[in-house]
Image (cartoon, helix red, strand yellow):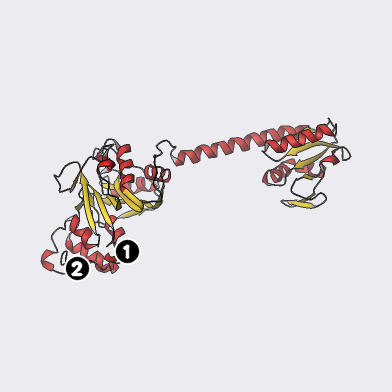
Amino acid sequence: MGLNVNAEFEYFIKKKSYKQYENYSLLMLGKQDVNFSVKKVYECIRRVGFEYKKGIIDLEDIDVYSKSIDSYDLFKLLGFRSVYALDINDYEGANIIADLADIHLTSRITEKFDYILDGGTLEHIFDIKEALINTCKLLRENGVIIHNVPSNGWCDHGFYSFSPSFFIDFYKNNGFDIDSIFLFGYKYPDTDAPAIFSPDCRMIDVDRWVKENGKEFRFNVICIARKVKSLEKYNLHFLQHMYEDYFCNLRMMKERYDFEYRMNKLLEKINDKNRTKRISIYGSGQTAERIIELLGEKRQEIIGVYELNKKVGDNVRLGVYELKVLCIDDVIDDNIGYIFIASVKRQVIDIIRQRIREVKYRGIELI
């Protein structure tokens, strides 16, 4: 567990002043090690112009430059009103002793925190489901949770390594907005080395960087999520969004294929030279435009469209074509043989079927 100067620390000092944090509390999941020196803290603060809280540690004293800084002091330096660390024991100096996976945790700890920092704890907890739920419950509404956890190159460091979609899908399904999520890579163990960021979290980038920089190049996923609302019950049953999108695209492709397959079969029938029956279309949206495109040369047989929300006799534009709005009672006089229903609404289909029955015209084929 540890803070990285190029990751979490950079996030906190973007606020520019300790006054932005002085009314807020912070909970560390495990007391965090600070993996950089006092000198590095001072350099970063000067670079961004952050106004730090005086009286915690003298950052301008060169005698302390090479020393490390305690994480409690670091966050008080940044201005936090109160700083806590929760751990299963007090071995590393935690001031709240508890099991993050305890199902009764939030009945024992009633305080809510404004910021929760997971600098590499979640991967060490086997019951990750309960740990995440408790973390959400310990956070105030509009509070921020920050994760910096292993993603690639950390075999056997903990029970788990994480993909960005783990956090994206969990938080978006449980009352949070994702403020930021990205992959953060560096040459282990040199955490001060220049970092590589992949804001779109593409694994192809990780593969390339590992190949170019050697196996010692490791990646963490950093997720910053904001709690929008509290939930009574958390949703733990959802598809990984990228596969949900994939299946959705497959369904769309199948529907499109089925549509065009059916249309091609119908066009074979309609294009029979012995048939002279004319065509009308119900609807004037995108599906109607696709029907017209697929009809090809047979478009000349289209006499118009039926549209409940349009005035009979008006013209409607479908792509580059203009067609007249018809009355459903015109079907007999206009010798219409086919009505293409460009609608998925069952009510619409039933209305047209019923109207055709009423005018007792049985030669019409609904498509």
Label at residue 54: 2
Which residue occupies the foreground of this view, 72 or 333?
72
Q: Mark 1 points at which residue?
A: 15
Q: What element carries label 1?
A: helix
Mark 1 is on which residue type?
A: Lys
Density class for disc 1 (Cα within 10 Å; few <14, some 14-19, many ≥20) is some
Mark 2 is on which residue type?
A: Lys
Most distant residue in the top direction: 362
Density class for disc 2 (Cα within 10 Å; few <14, some 14-19, many ≥20) is few
Q: Is residue 211 left or right of residue 282?
A: left
Which residue occupies the foreground of this view, 222 or 202?
222
Q: What stretch is highlighted in magenta?
A: 53-60
Whether residue 356 is in magenta: the answer is no
Say which quarter of the image contains residue 195. bottom left
Q: x and y percent of residue 42 in the render?
A: 21, 65
Of labels 2 and 1, earlier in sequence is: 1
Q: x and y percent of residue 176 in the render?
A: 40, 48
Q: In this view, does 323 lie to the left or right of 198?
A: right
Most distant residue in the left direction: 63
Q: Is residue 97 left or right of residue 50?
A: left
